[in-house]
């Protein structure tokens, strides 16, 4: 089966929606990264997502809705704070973990009694949900463990022959997956996976925002996790990623002492002046770094990189999301100078 490349027009969106209604899997653009979408209530369709990705069965999927008011159809309880957060951040890159009801099968929730609910802002994903009439389960549209795709081209590279179709909606806006939160109390949430909705932004609505330990640390083998991206090595290219926290001059010295065939660096915009080794840049600030990170990791694979030294981003604001993705790509190994 060859995967169809669909255009961003109403006829192709309707065709994609029909495929989803018929139990197929479709690559769909969102404002975060591209997702593999299927009917969240159809166990066989959701199983096709796991098969296409090679994804572990205990890694839960996020369910995408066209409006937060639809969450009542897929959850058994919605905290008052969730409504306040939805009013502020939906549609957008925020996923909220809530108790699921029987319409969400265990295969979708990774065996958990909870489900992650998100209302995407990308017009194509929104239209596919509307046209299909389905809640759409959609993890990132990559082979499990590899960098998430931010363009249709990369989805096709990973998924050609594995899914029915991919809609080309251009480059993803944010470049990293949604922020995932759980509810700790009436006024407190816990960030399980950082994204474009930052702790500081959540504090505009919540009294307390807790950063989960697993964001910057490895989860114990066999532990159950409530969010995608908390377990297993994630986001990694074929090359070995080595994260480095240091001043630029110390970073240059480290790369130089380990330089050879297949060695590259991933550096900030502005670092490249007189940088004497093979490199790519991935942005001057955290927002740019989030936007470009996954594309640059894939480009490094295309260039034949075998080892990549990466200047670690700030872990503040959106930078926490970039740091989180990189530390997982690096297998939690960081060189600090």
Image (tube, rainbow, N blue to C red):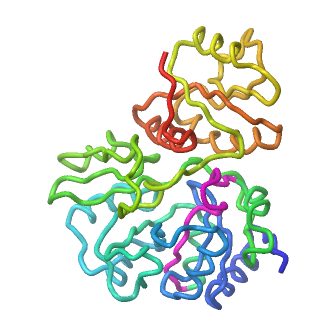
The image shows residue 263, relative to residue 225, as above or below, that is: above
- What residue do we see at 57% from left, 88% from top? 44
Residue placed furthest toward the front: 221
Residue 325: where, in percent of width, then height?
52, 43
Query: In this image, 232 relative to 26: left or right?
Result: left
Residue 259: where, in percent of width, then height?
74, 19
Q: Depth check: 174 or 233 in front?
A: 233
Residue 220: where, in percent of width, then height?
37, 53
Q: Picture quarter containing residue 243? A: top right
The image shows residue 53, relative to residue 217, as above or below, that is: below
- Indicate whether residue 62 is drawn in magenta: no
- What residue do we see at 64% from left, 24% from top? 267
- What residue do we see at 57% from left, 61% from top? 122
| Magenta-drawn segment | 133-150
Residue placed furthest toward the bottom: 22
The image shows residue 273, relative to residue 93, as above or below, that is: above
The image shows residue 261, relative to residue 25, as above or below, that is: above
Q: Depth check: 322 or 21 in front?
A: 322
Q: Picture quarter containing residue 293? A: top right
Residue 250: where, in percent of width, then height?
58, 10
Number of labelled discs?
0
Indicate the quadrant containing the N terminus: top left, top right, bottom left or bottom right.
bottom right
- What residue do we see at 46% from left, 74% from top? 65
Query: In this image, 216 relative to 11: left or right?
Result: left
Q: Main secondary structure of the magenta part?
A: loop
Query: In this image, 65 relative to 97: left or right?
Result: right
């Amino acid at each position: 089966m060859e995967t169809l490349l669909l255009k961003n027009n109403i006829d192709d969106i309707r065709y994609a929606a029909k495929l989803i209604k018929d139990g197929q899997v479709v690559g769909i653009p969102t404002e975060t990264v591209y997702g593999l979408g299927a009917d969240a209530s159809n166990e066989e369709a959701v199983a096709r997502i796991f098969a296409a990705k090679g994804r572990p069965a205990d890694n839960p999927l996020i369910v995408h809705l066209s409006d937060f008011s639809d969450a009542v159809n897929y959850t058994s309880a919605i905290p008052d704070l969730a409504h306040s957060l939805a009013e502020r951040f939906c549609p957008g890159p925020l996923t909220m973990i809530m108790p699921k009801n029987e319409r969400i099968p265990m295969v979708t929730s990774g065996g958990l009694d909870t489900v992650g609910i998100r209302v995407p802002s990308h017009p194509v994903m929104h239209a596919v949900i509307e046209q299909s009439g389905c809640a759409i389960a959609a993890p990132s549209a990559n082979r499990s463990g590899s960098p998430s795709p931010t363009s249709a081209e990369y989805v096709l590279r990973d998924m050609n022959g594995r899914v029915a179709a991919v809609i080309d909606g251009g480059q993803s806006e944010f470049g990293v997956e949604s922020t995932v939160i759980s509810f700790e109390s009436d006024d407190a949430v816990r960030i399980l996976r950082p994204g474009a909705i930052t702790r500081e932004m959540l504090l505009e609505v919540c009294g307390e925002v807790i950063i989960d330990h697993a964001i910057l640390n490895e989860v114990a083998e066999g532990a159950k996790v409530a969010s995608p991206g908390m377990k297993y090595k994630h986001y990694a290219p074929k090359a070995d990623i080595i994260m480095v926290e240091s001043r630029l001059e110390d970073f240059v010295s480290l790369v130089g002492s380990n330089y050879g065939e297949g060695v590259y660096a991933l550096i900030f915009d502005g670092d490249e002046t007189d940088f004497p080794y093979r490199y790519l840049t991935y942005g001057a600030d955290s927002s740019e770094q989030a936007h470009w990170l996954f594309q640059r990791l894939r480009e490094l694979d295309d260039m034949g990189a075998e080892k990549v030294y990466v200047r670690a981003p700030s872990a503040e604001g959106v930078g926490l999301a970039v740091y989180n993705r990189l530390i997982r790509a690096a297998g939690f190994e960081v060189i600090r100078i």
